[in-house]
Image: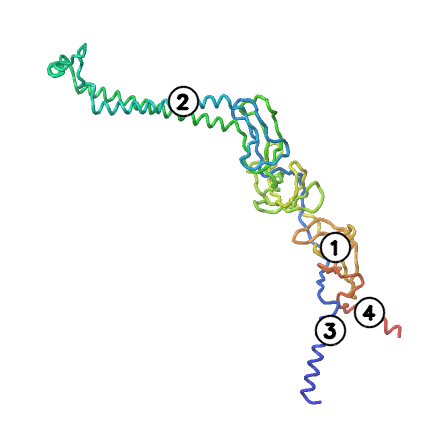
């Protein structure tokens, strides 16, 4: 056999070994040990689900409830009218204000005309006509009598001229002020007319209606509770020492009605002051929009107490746990590399993707992380340990 034949045979052997290793049933399994880890103490706090936005619409003016558009549970878009008060008296006042504005406009037109006439035809220079239509005596008086009176100080023609100008200007200003006053009255009445309508400030649902059609209400009296639809938050009162390690945007586990998997909710607002009687701080968390919840629903918030810790406990990756018939199971690997299915009892969530185990495995055991769907008990998933292989050889020699 020459060198080329030997190299070709060696290459074929390596390729065959690689193919055999690739097709080996032990390839592709991630085996991790069961470890003991100390976990922080998690405190469960009772909480309540509330709408992300809620508002109570109240009466802004006295009046009689004329119409209620919806009842509890009805959905409305933004700017939709929910409650209408009687506005007949305000509409009558608005008609009077509109008439006053028209009168003011006419008065302004007349005053401006008088002002223009005074500029071009002053009253102080007007010829005084004599009785019977004979204006000659008045003309003579205007030509000789008036200048003589000015010369003797008995009459001031310039003062009369100034007084007449001020008089017509005052009439124009009074007419303009009347117009502004009428327009102000109209704006005031329009604002009060808007107060007769309780409008939805955002898209949402009616939570509660406090009045009925025909009721007489006073300013400040509740009419409707209205809340935003589809978005909810969790409100809880936490002890002060638990809030010190929280920050806006931090995720906390929340359980609805004390069942099901925990939902991550992010801290939205931490109130700055504590309750003086209970020594707690109010904290608000936002739920994901995909979560189906109801306002007033009970919830529980898990908060880590950094000041206390629990004893070390067995832990495995949460992805190693599978569920069959409602029971948590793991695939453990014995020293011979054979997979075995074990029932375990889970503990608390330790964070970091790990979960505590109360029973079913021991420290040092090996489990398969993220087992594939086709894996079965009794399947070879790893190479046997050296000690296990030695025990097998020894037992075979003793039998021989």
Residue at image mark 2 = 99
Choose mark 4 or mark 1, whichever is in front: 1
Q: Position of residue 201 (x, y in %)?
A: 54, 35
In this view, which residue lies farthest toward the bottom? Answer: 2
Which residue is found at the position 71% from the left and 60% from the top? 32
Mark 3 or mark 4, earlier in chain: 3
Q: Secondary structure at mark 3?
A: helix
Task: Give residue 306's mark.
Answer: none
Mark 4 or mark 2, earlier in chain: 2
Residue at image mark 1 = 322
In this view, which residue lies farthest toward the top? Answer: 131
Q: Quadrant of the image for the C terminus?
A: bottom right
Q: Quadrant of residue 335?
A: bottom right
Q: Position of residue 242 (x, y in %)?
A: 62, 42
Mark 4 or mark 1, earlier in chain: 1
Residue at image mark 4 = 391
Q: Residues within 10 Å of mark 4 (few under 14, many from 20)?
A: few
Choose mark 4 or mark 2, whichever is in front: 2
Mark 3 or mark 1, earlier in chain: 3
Q: Quadrant of residue 391?
A: bottom right
Q: Secondary structure at mark 1?
A: strand
Residue at image mark 3 = 20
Cα distance between the residues tagged 2 and 1: 82 Å
Q: Position of residue 270 (x, y in %)?
A: 57, 40
Position of 317 relative to 24 (above/below) = above
Choose mark 2 or mark 1, whichever is in front: 2
Q: Residues within 10 Å of mark 2 (few under 14, many from 20)?
A: few
């Amino acid at each position: 056999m020459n060198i080329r034949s030997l190299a070709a045979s060696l290459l074929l052997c390596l390729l065959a070994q690689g193919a055999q290793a690739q097709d080996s049933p032990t390839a592709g399994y991630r085996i991790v040990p069961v470890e003991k880890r100390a976990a922080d103490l998690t405190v469960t706090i009772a909480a309540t689900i509330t709408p992300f936005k809620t508002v109570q619409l109240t009466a802004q003016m006295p009046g009689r409830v004329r119409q209620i558009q919806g009842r509890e549970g009805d959905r409305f878009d933004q700017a939709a009218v929910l409650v209408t008060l009687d506005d007949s008296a305000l509409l009558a006042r608005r008609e009077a204000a509109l008439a006053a504005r028209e009168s003011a406009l006419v008065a302004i037109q007349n005053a401006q005309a008088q002002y223009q006439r005074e500029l071009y035809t002053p009253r102080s220079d007007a010829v005084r006509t004599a009785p019977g239509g004979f204006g000659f005596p008045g003309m003579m008086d205007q030509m000789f009598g008036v200048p003589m009176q000015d010369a003797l100080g008995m009459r001031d023609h310039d003062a009369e001229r100034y007084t007449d100008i001020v008089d017509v200007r005052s009439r124009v200003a009074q007419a303009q002020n009347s117009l502004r006053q009428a327009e102000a009255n109209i704006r005031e009445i329009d604002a009060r007319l808007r107060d007769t309508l309780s409008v939805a400030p955002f898209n949402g649902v009616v939570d509660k209606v406090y009045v009925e059609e025909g009721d007489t209400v006073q300013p400040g009296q509740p009419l409707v509770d209205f809340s935003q639809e589809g978005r909810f938050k969790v409100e809880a009162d936490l002890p002060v020492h638990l809030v010190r390690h929280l920050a806006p945007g931090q995720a906390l586990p929340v359980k609805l009605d004390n069942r099901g998997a925990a939902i991550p909710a992010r801290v939205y607002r931490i109130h700055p002051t504590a309750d003086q009687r209970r020594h707690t701080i109010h904290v608000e968390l936002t739920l994901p929009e995909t979560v189906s919840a109801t306002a007033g629903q009970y919830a529980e918030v898990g908060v880590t107490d950094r000041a206390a810790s629990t004893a070390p406990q067995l832990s495995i990756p949460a992805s190693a746990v599978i569920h069959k018939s409602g029971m948590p199971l793991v695939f453990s690997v014995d020293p011979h590399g054979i997979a075995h299915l074990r029932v375990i009892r889970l503990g608390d969530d330790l964070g970091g993707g790990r979960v505590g185990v109360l029973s079913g495995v021991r420290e040092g055991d090996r489990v398969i992380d993220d087992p594939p769907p086709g894996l079965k008990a009794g399947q070879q998933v790893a190479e046997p340990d050296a000690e296990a292989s030695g025990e097998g050889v020894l037992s075979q020699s003793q039998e021989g």
